[in-house]
Image: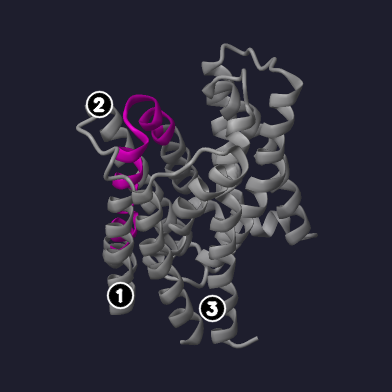
Amino acid sequence: MTTNQRYRIAVVAVVTSAILNSGVGVLIRQVQAADEWQIIAVRGLGVTFGLALIFALQERGRIGEALVKISPWLLMGGFFQTAASLCYIHAIQNTTIANTLFIQSAAPFATAILAWLCLKETVHRGTWAAMFIATAGIAVMVSDGISQGNGFGNIMALGSMLFFSAFVVVLRFGRTANMLPVVLFSWVVSFGIGAAMAGGNLVIPLSDFIFILLWGAILSPIVYALFTFGSRYVLGAEVSLLVQVEFILGPLLVWLIVNEEPTPMTLIGGALVLAAVITRGIQMTRA
């Protein structure tokens, strides 16, 4: 397989991970009784087992060797991924969804700067253009709901965005190895934190357990496997740009399945983001 072919497959993998992850909102809407920390703990347990299975299948007979290769990045990457997830939860709890999405839309820019500083990765001008258009689209999407919000919540949203960008850069640092255990480690930690914050009470209704497990043990491991594979060959800023398709498809799926109707501004802004990502994605696969 040539380098260009591998790159095209990686682009498709990242976009597919974002498309699959956009269904999370629908699953969350089905959870009726479990609180945030119970969701984190149960999901963490599911993700841990799911990723462990995928990693074992990928590295049959070479698990020890594969772990040694990524050992320098395990703690750092695990910390950034865990911190991003926890900050996101506090952002959602303490400020508006609109504020959170708008702040997180800066992730491609933060990733581009970090990747340039740490890895000397340069960003194609087409990617810069797509990033600006996508950010403008998200600004239009959430314009009806942007407010000053809660200062702590806004800081948590900023932290989530920065930690995610740092996580992407760590994946790029270790791109010559299978970095899936870094994600696995982060969810082992998330499970422990979630269980502790839930006071050890992980007894939830069976229906909630099924939906959270569907999310954690099946959907998330596939998403993370595709994402970590794609990040080995796609530049950090491009990875952060491509996953923004999730911000568009998420509200649309919730609308179609749960009947939560989006505002006209959401549809207009979503069209801008989708156009930017699709156009740049096509350019990247033709490179």
Q: Residue, x 65% and y 86% (percent of image)?
A: 1
User: Marks 1/2: CA distance?
Assistant: 35 Å
Q: Nearer the viewer, residue 47 or 26?
A: 26
Quick check: 279 left or right of 233?
Answer: left
Q: Residue, x 44% and y 82% (percent of image)?
A: 283
User: Marks 3/2: CA distance?
Assistant: 41 Å
- Measured as percent of width and height from the top left, residue 5 is found at 59, 84
Count the numbered circles shown.
Answer: 3
Quick check: 214 left or right of 113?
Answer: right
Q: Nearer the viewer, mark 1 or mark 2?
A: 2
- Measured as percent of width and height from the top left, residue 179 is found at 57, 57
Q: Disc 2 residue type? A: Asn
Q: Secondary structure at mark 3?
A: helix
User: Marks 1/3: CA distance?
Assistant: 16 Å
Q: Which residue position holds label 1?
A: 122
- Residue 100 visible, this orientation: yes
- C-beta proximity under 8 Å, tags 3 and 2: no
Q: Nearer the viewer, residue 64 or 209?
A: 209
Above or below, 202 against 250 in this view is above
Which circle marks residue 30 in the picture? none
Q: Secondary structure at mark 1?
A: loop
Q: Which residue position holds label 3?
A: 7
Q: Give residue 127's quadrant in the image.
A: bottom left
Q: Which residue position holds label 2?
A: 150
Magenta segment includes 94: yes
Q: Residue, x 43% and y 51% (percent of image)?
A: 167
Q: Disc 1 residue type? A: Thr
- Residue 59 visible, this orientation: no
Q: Disc 3 residue type? A: Tyr
Q: Which residues are magenta?
A: 87-112
Magenta segment includes 271: no
Q: Secondary structure at mark 2?
A: loop
